[in-house]
Image (spheres, grey):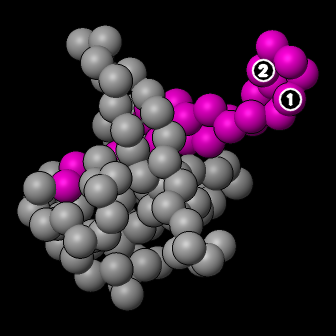
Amino acid sequence: MSEEERIDIVEGIDEDGNRLLLRVNRYFYYNGEEYVLLSDDCDEPAQDIDDTTFFVMRVVEAVDEDGEEIEEFEPVDEDLMEALIEVVKTNFEDDSEIIDELDEE
């Protein structure tokens, strides 16, 4: 698999304490801060878009226990989420399936 085809997967925990695998779709900036568009379709892009849940989170640089720089993803409040969804829809029109799904959420 080439570097361009590689799928970045992050692991997290949902509000019920269950393991959650999310695919990184793209990073973007809004008002000087970095955000990431994530989805739960880690099985490859062939998964039906109707069964996919999207998340937009703030990217925060942190340092782990070994002193290595890492990225952490933080949830954003509802008002900011609405603005970020508009940014995704405006800037990434080529991802029409993602845009359609965000319209429904």
Q: Residue furthest bottom?
A: 94
Give the CA separation, mark 1 to mark 2: 5 Å
In the foreground, 76 or 50: 50
User: Mark 1 near mark 2, Cβ–Cβ under 8 Å?
Assistant: yes
Residue 83 in view, yes or no: no
Residue at (89% x, 21% y) in the render: 67
Specify the amino acid type for callout 1.
Answer: Glu
The residue that label 2 is drawn on is 64
**Quarter placement of the N terminus:** bottom right
Residue 40 in view, yes or no: yes
Task: Locate residue 52, reporting x and y percent.
Answer: 19, 55
Residue at (24% x, 13% y) in the render: 16
The residue that label 1 is drawn on is 68
Start-end of magenta stretch? 52-76
**Quick check: 18 left or right of 8?**
left
Q: Residues within 10 Å of mark 1 (few under 14, many from 20)?
A: few
From the image, give the main secondary structure of the stretch colored magenta: strand
Task: Locate residue 71, reporting x and y percent.
Answer: 68, 37
Q: What element does badge 2 sit on?
A: loop
Q: What element does badge 1 sit on?
A: loop
Specify the amino acid type for callout 2.
Answer: Asp
Q: Is 4 within the magenta? A: no
Q: How many marks?
A: 2
